[in-house]
Amino acid sequence: MWDSQVAYAEVVGNLGYKDKAMDVLLVLAEDETQECWLRRSCAETVGKLGEKEKALDILINLYMAQKDKYEMEARRIYNSLWEMTAI
């Protein structure tokens, strides 16, 4: 369910309501009570909407908070960081 909501926020942002979509996505991405995968997904969308610096900060913090760097979610965060910083 959340994946479709994040995708919806990305579409809304692309349709000219970027500020409103960004506000919702940032609140979720920065909320430490949310699941890590949801925060990662929101941060990725923030980056796709043009705020790469904010997205990178969130993703770096998420990655550093992972106890096991080889766990699947940690690898997904790492991959997101890699893709976002690729030249």
Image: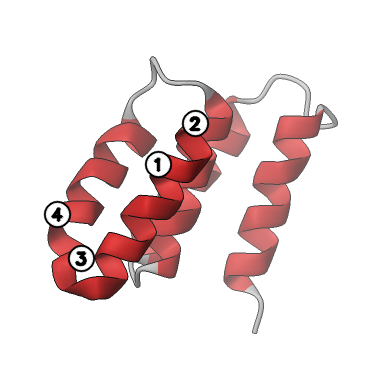
Instruction: Return the mark for residue 5.
Output: 1
The amino acid type, in three-letter code, at marker 1 is Gln
Please indicate whether residue 19 sits to the left or right of residue 39 in the image. left
Name the foreground residue: 70 vs 6.
Answer: 6
Could you give the CA–CA distance between mark 3 and mark 2, rounded to whole angstroms? 21 Å
Name the spot of residue 9 as percent of width and height, x first: 32, 53
Q: Crowding at label 3, few (<14), some or many (≥20) Cα neighbours within 10 Å? A: some
Could you give the CA–CA distance between mark 1 and mark 2, rounded to whole angstroms? 7 Å
Q: Which residue is mark 2?
A: 1
Q: Is residue 62 above or below residue 11?
A: above
Name the spot of residue 60 as percent of width and height, x first: 53, 45
Q: Is residue 75 above or below residue 15?
A: above
Q: Which residue is mark 4?
A: 20
Name the spot of residue 57 as percent of width and height, x first: 42, 50
- Front position among marks 1 and 4: 1
Could you give the CA–CA distance between mark 3 and mark 1, rounded to whole angstroms? 15 Å
Give the secondary structure at mark 1.
helix
